Image: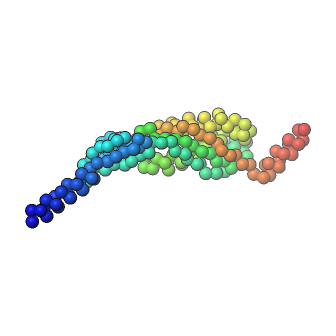
């Protein structure tokens, strides 16, 4: 009977030890919660938690890309165009990214769509087509004001494509032909 008890206690001890040791990769951080309260971030490397009391949420710190889906915008000169963009961002503070906003990836995607629409809507089509760099910078600056409190840094914003309706393309072609 003593052998059985010894084996049972040994297995139980090894199981608890296995649940206690956590390994976090170089590009991750673990947000540690103890009984539901934020206790800070850990990693990279090996650390020990209290099983059934502590809970960790892993956060990837690598640069991520976010494709802003094609959406129709109306420019300042009342021309509609389909626009899509790509945003590169990374988490700078894993604790804030988990605690300050429920879904930091989804929230970043939605605010990116809104900022893209707002900035392009405040400019004329000619500026949107010819001066994308300054518009990209303006969108990035506006995104930063929202995402920094979430622990997220926006690295690059790039307007990928601006597509005009077919009738607008024909009108521009006629105007260009007339100017020649």
Residue 91, visible in the rendered structure: yes
Would you place residue 144 above or below residue 12 in this image?
A: above
Residue at 83% across, 49% down: 170
Quadrant, the N terminus: bottom left
Location of residue 161 in the rendering, given as x and y in whole percent from the top left corner: 68, 46
Residue visible at 66% across and 47% down?
83
167 lies left or right of 162: right
Q: Position of residue 36 (x, y in %)?
A: 30, 49
Q: From where the camera sits, is residue 38 visible?
A: no
- From the viewer's side, name the closer residue of 38 and 142: 38
Q: Residue at x 69, y 43 (%)?
A: 75
Q: Is residue 72 left or right of residue 31?
A: right
How many dots with numbers? 0
Quadrant of the image occupied by residue 180: top right
Image spot of residue 39 (x, y percent): 30, 42
* Residue at x 72% of width, y 48% of height: 163
Please provide percent x and percent y for residue 160: 65, 44
């Amino acid at each position: 009977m003593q052998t059985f008890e010894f084996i049972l206690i040994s297995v139980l001890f090894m199981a608890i030890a296995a649940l206690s040791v956590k390994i976090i990769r170089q590009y991750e951080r673990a947000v540690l919660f103890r009984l539901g309260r934020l206790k800070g971030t850990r990693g990279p490397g090996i650390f020990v938690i209290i099983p059934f009391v502590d809970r960790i949420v892993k956060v990837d710190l690598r640069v991520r890309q976010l494709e802003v889906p094609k959406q129709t915008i109306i420019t300042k000169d009342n021309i509609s165009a389909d626009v899509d963009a790509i945003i590169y961002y990374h988490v700078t503070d894993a604790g804030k990214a988990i605690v300050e906003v429920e879904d930091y990836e989804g929230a970043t995607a939605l605010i990116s769509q809104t900022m893209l629409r707002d900035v392009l809507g405040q400019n004329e089509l000619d500026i949107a087509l010819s001066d994308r760099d300054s518009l990209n910078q303006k969108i990035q600056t506006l995104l930063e004001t929202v995402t920094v409190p979430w622990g997220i840094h926006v690295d690059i914003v790039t307007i990928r494509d601006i597509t005009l309706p077919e009738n607008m393309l024909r009108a521009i072609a006629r105007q260009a032909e007339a100017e020649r």
